[in-house]
Amino acid sequence: MCELLAFLKLFCDSISSKELQIFCISFISLLLPFVLILVSYICILSSVLKIQSVARSKAFSTCSSHLAAVELYFGTVMLMYFGPSSQYSLDQEKCSPICYVILSPMLNPLIYSLNNREIKTLGMEHKNETFMFQEIILLGFSKDPKINTGLFVLFFMIYIVTVIGNGLMLCIVLLHSQLHIPMYFFLCILSILDLCYSTTVLPKLLGDLFSSHGTIFIGSCIAQIYIILLVEGCECLLLATMAYDRYVAICQPLHYPIVMRWSMCFKLTILIFVTSFILCTLPSLFSPITICYNQINHFMCELLAFLKLSCDSISSSELQIFCISFISLLLPFVLILVSYICILSSVLKIQSAGRSKAFSTCSSHLSVVGLYFGTVMLMYFGPSSQYSTDQEKYSSICYVIVSPMLNPLIYSLNNREIKTLCRTMFKQN
């Protein structure tokens, strides 16, 4: 599309004055509203912590949708406009508008409907034939207020670390031109997916921990399932794409600039999202169920737990989940294994210095793959009717809450460029 930063590069003259103008306008129109939002929510948080637990849960639920929309929109727009355009890759500029021009308008109504009782009530008036209940009770972890307070502190810290870690990863990659290569581009996509994971689940969970019984409207529950399925599929396919990127970089270094050119990276990214939607989300849209119960022994709306509310037999749904899991989980996992077998055979042929660097590059990716695929495959390849709901609950903690927090830490620990840039940024500050 015709975007301002890209259009300025068509000028014959110097655009430094226009860049300065854009920076000043961006400071007023983006950073000041963002600071105002932060100050508002700091005041809200201090007020909410003084009120009763039931009202506190309602307040958290009211604000979480707005915070999710703010995080998605301001994050991508500020990362784009606060980087000097002349030092900013055109392909990177092309990717950022996808988030705030295409993805954000699609996700905003879903995000707001998750926590807006009036919208959810109106949207579900015509679905009473399928859904006998308007709210689902999430049993969560415990009824003990002391345990819930401890869990609130734990999950709140995890959420803060997740947002800061992934946000810092995005900033470092987008603001440093030496990192504008395909490997870090896919790493940015992974950080965005991790932020989506955490924001979909944790704000609601934090509110429920201060409630006597956590409830979620049926429409919100279904929207949460769809978003989690979409992100799950995207992350599996993305990790397989990242493994292929490392395979080409190490095993076919001369062909790497051609095979992994920017146009191919963008096509792969679009293919990941489209394939995930078709494989993971679309089948659920065409498979409605009639529910006879309204209690889930879980802290979120998860597909396997939700199916157990069905009045009818879920054997066909279990078979469908198994087939989809085979395609969206097992095939990418096999592709990753094959890629790393080829990488290992190539690495063993090179000199010790180069071998050490190659192992360091790949070890972080393998750690993320092991953590993510291990818990997700353990969960989805067991028939849900024979699977302990408590096990489902704790498996979900690993890939929905813990994994998004650890991913930026794992990648930064084994990446020399990112560690060097982090040290430089902290020394400057």
Image (cartoon, rainbow, N blue to C red):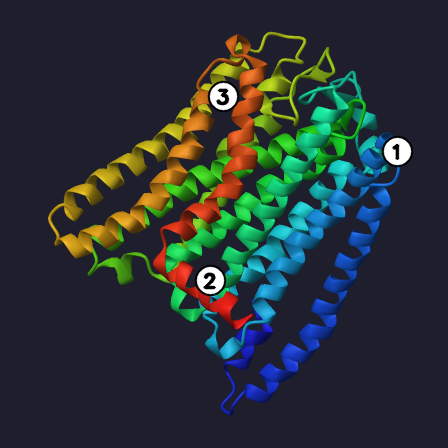
Helix, strand or loop status at disc 2:
helix
- Residue 277 visible? The answer is no
Give above or below for 401 relative to 313. below
What residue is at 72 percent from the left and 49 percent from the top?
67
Checking the image for residue 104, the label placed there is none
Reading the chain from its start, which is encountered first: label 1 or label 2? 1
Residue position marked by numbered label 3 in the rendering: 321
Identity, as a three-letter code, of the amino acid under mark 3: Ile
Q: Mark 3: few, some, or many residues within 10 Å (few <14, many ≥20)?
A: many
Image marks 1 and 3: residues in contact by CB distance under 8 Å: no
Helix, strand or loop status at disc 3:
helix
Checking the image for residue 422, the label placed there is 2
On screen, residue 58 versus residue 188, left or right, reads right
**Residue 148 coordinates in the image, percent (x, y):** 71, 27
Image marks 3 and 2: residues in contact by CB distance under 8 Å: no
Identity, as a three-letter code, of the amino acid under mark 1: Gln
Helix, strand or loop status at disc 1:
loop
The quarter in which the N terminus is drawn is bottom right
**Extreme residue in the bottom direction:** 13
Residue position marked by numbered label 1 in the rendering: 52
**Residue 409 coordinates in the image, percent (x, y):** 46, 48
- Residue 186 visible? The answer is yes
Q: Mark 1: few, some, or many residues within 10 Å (few <14, many ≥20)?
A: few
